[in-house]
Amino acid sequence: MFVVTSNQMFQAECNAVKRGISFPQLMENAGQACAKIIKNHFCISKDNSKKILVICGKGKNGGDGFVIARKMWEYGCDVTVMLACGEPKASDAIDMYSLVEATGIEILNYDNNLTVLKSYIENAEIIVEAIFGTGFSGSLNHSLSVLAQAVNAAKGTLVSIDVPAGADCDAASVKGAVFKADTTIAISAYKPIHIMKPCNKYCGRTVIADIGITKEDFRNIDSVTCFSLNAQDIRDMLPKRKPVSNKGTYGHALCVCGSMRMTGAAYLAVSGALRCGVGLVTAAFPQSAYAAIAPKLVEPLLLPLESNFEGTFAFSAKAGISEAVKRASAVLIGCGLGFNKDTTLLVHSLIKEINKPMIIDADGINALSTNIDILKDAQAPVILTPHPGEMSRICGKSIGEIIENPIVTAYEFAKKYGVTVVLKGSNTIVCSHDSNEIYINTTGNSGLARGGSGDLLAGMTVSLLAQGMSPFDASVCAVYLHGLCADMVADETSMRGMLPSDVLNHLPELFSKFE
């Protein structure tokens, strides 16, 4: 599922026009597709007609609205059109407006006067809002803010076309008043506002209208594109279990995690790796944490190594880790590692030496922050899994800047340092130095906002990496499944009370739906 900006959407439309579809035909297709979605959703028929108010702007989104009004009238509905900003200005919208006039549908001018028009808003069973679409930025003027307030207070169901008026499509932000849709019909593809939290809530339920723009039209866009996936997509990507196989078939993950103070990080990472199907896991941890970690880990191989007086790995543990790397398919470094001179030197040294795909998480990233350029000396593919605070330490941007524009932050860093970045957040972003596609995750909830969630995700990722998936695909699948499992737990229990261990324990049930 593509996620495109307003400019990319226009490029895709231009690509479709080059194939022979005209812009007026695209507008007709859009209006007809939206009308059909509305008809089916509300079970509209000659015997079950609805009172519908269509509020149109003066641009192309308004043109879509005029087509919708005409089609709903043809379906037998009682339709009224309200011109929110005066008569249309776009040429193809003018043509669609003339067709509405020819039907005899009642047309009203808003003119910033609700005294007469308020009854139309209050009596409509369905309100279709087609004012701005993807072309809006900034904030609604006073006149439209008043109209938005009246529509939001009405009892009828609000359906916005492409983007609710008042919402910035690309920035996925809202400044001031906005039409709060119950359903948003996205034209051809998702836009950032449809999936980026928290402002996607103004879209309500989002459905996509197919208007004849193909996947190739989107693939031929001359800029970086974003996408999201659904459960079926993930099912198709996951490594298949073979009828005849053994533990060696599914790879060997080495988890270099834990310390005396953070034993749970090792447990969650190692257990997450095991639950995601890897054949073998070696858990390397400081000897000082043996009594706390070992009793919790029954299935993995245990590799206790030299520790220092702080209860973390001593630098001398490197020899044992290096030997274990030889037997591993993929390596995870950092969960609960602790941040001091020994662990920093250890991480730097391992990055330059390890020749297996690796994930660097948590304190491994903190160690990198002291010499980020060492990533350029890596001998194998690297996945970094920072939260915004850790990302700030390694890229130099403030946390606020990162949260405001996570896609650009992650993409620029991945390209500069030749790595795959998993920038964790309400919409986790995955991007890679060797791809011009950026994944935006749509699963997960605020129940994951607690210590240990990232350790579990890192373990899940190294498991898929060890099973032979590419760094990008392993990251995408792990992020989606991690969030989806958390959603399942929240549905059965609560977001407030759920723990990372609850998500871990729910993974087998989740995977039963993928086999």
Image (cartoon, rainbow, N blue to C red):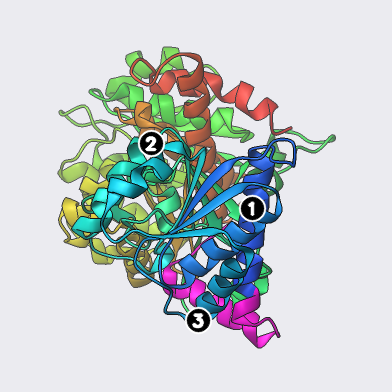
Q: Position of residue 275 (x, y in %)?
A: 57, 27
Per the model, the C-alpha gap separating discs 3 and 1 is 37 Å
| Quarter holding residue 103 | bottom right
Q: Residue at x 52, y 33 (%)?
A: 484
Of pointers 1 and 2, the one earlier in the residue sequence: 1
Q: Is residue 179 something one can see in this rendering?
A: no
Residue 266 disc label: none
What percent of the width, then of the height, locates residue 58?
Answer: 41, 71
Label 2 sits on residue: 154
Left or right: 297 with respect to 105?
left
Residue assigned mark 1: 72
Question: What kind of residue is marked 2?
Answer: Ala
| Residue corresponding to mark 3 | 222
Q: Are marks 1 and 2 in contact (CB under 8 Å)?
A: no
Magenta-colored span: 1-25
Disc 1 residue type (three-letter): Met
Secondary structure under badge 3? Answer: loop
Quarter of the image for the C terminus: give it: top right
Mark-to-mark CA distance, 1 and 2: 20 Å
| Picture residue at 61% right of the left edge, 78% below the top | 24
Identify the residue at horizontal 65%, vertical 29% (top origin).
Answer: 511
Residue 22 in magenta stretch: yes
